[in-house]
Image (cartoon, rainbow, N blue to C red):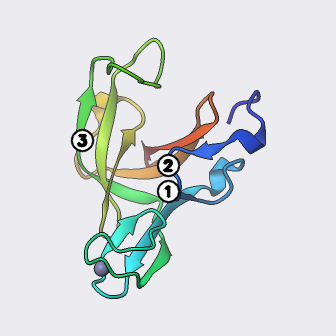
Amino acid sequence: MTDSTPLSDFRPVRSGLMTGALDDLASVGLAGSRCRACGETTLGANTLCPNCGSDDVFPIALSDEGKVWTYTVVRYRPPGDYKGAEPFQPFAIGLVELPEGLRVVAPVGGDPDAVRIGMTVRFTARARADGVVEFVYNPAA
Ligand SMILES: [Zn+2]
């Protein structure tokens, strides 16, 4: 959270992706949905199952903790609308597997060279200076 952003200006990086109050980052988590017809679990608040097309979908809470399934380290500043640290610093992007059976693409915090497949990481919401609430998975203590 930044001191200069009015609370009403916080918005999620993607609509329907998060639960909790964006002005209380500790309360923020990932929204999930599960299909009664086929059992598919998906990221975000969905009204249709992307797997089978059923509208018999209900919201579920997704765990804050997951494991790095795989990752890569971004060592060069991406072109275009990159909104990360300035000056650029290398960072890890992980595919984090959650106990609910889905994998989430997200930055992995901390030293990118310390990231390992199978390490336990924890969801952490953070607000950019422009008010957008995004998230990172930090190594679990
Ligand atoms: Zn389905």
| Residue type at the position of mark 1 | Leu
Q: Position of residue 21 (x, y in %)?
A: 68, 56
Mark 2, Cα crowd under 10 Å, few <14 / some 14-19 / many 20+, is few
Q: What residue lies at 25% left-to-right and 42% top-to-bottom?
A: 116
Mark 3, Cα crowd under 10 Å, few <14 / some 14-19 / many 20+, is some
Q: Which disc is residue 71 wearing?
A: 3
Q: Are marks 1 and 2 in contact (CB under 8 Å)?
A: yes
Mark 3 vs mark 2: give the one in front.
Answer: 2
Looking at this view, name the residue that lies furthest to the top: 87
Q: Quadrant of ligand 1?
A: bottom left
**In the picture provided, is 2 more to the left or to the right than 33?**
right
**In the picture provided, is 83 more to the left or to the right than 106?**
right
Mark 1, Cα crowd under 10 Å, few <14 / some 14-19 / many 20+, is some
Q: Position of residue 124 (x, y in %)?
A: 52, 47
C-alpha span from label 3 to label 1:
21 Å
Q: What residue lies at 44% left-to-right and 69% top-to-bottom?
A: 46
Q: What residue lies at 47% left-to-right and 48% top-to-bottom?
A: 141
Q: Quadrant of residue 28?
A: bottom right
Secondary-structure class at tag 1: loop
Q: Which disc is residue 131 wearing?
A: none
Does mark 2's beta carbon lie closer than 8 Å to ligand 1? no
C-alpha span from label 1 to label 2:
6 Å
The tag earlier along the polypeptide, 3 or 2, is 2
Secondary-structure class at tag 2: loop
The tag earlier along the polypeptide, 3 or 1, is 1
C-alpha span from label 3 to label 2:
22 Å
Q: Position of residue 18 (x, y in %)?
A: 54, 57
Q: Which disc is residue 17 wearing?
A: 1
Q: Which disc is residue 14 wearing?
A: 2
| Residue type at the position of mark 3 | Tyr
**In the picture provided, is 116 more to the left or to the right than 32?**
left
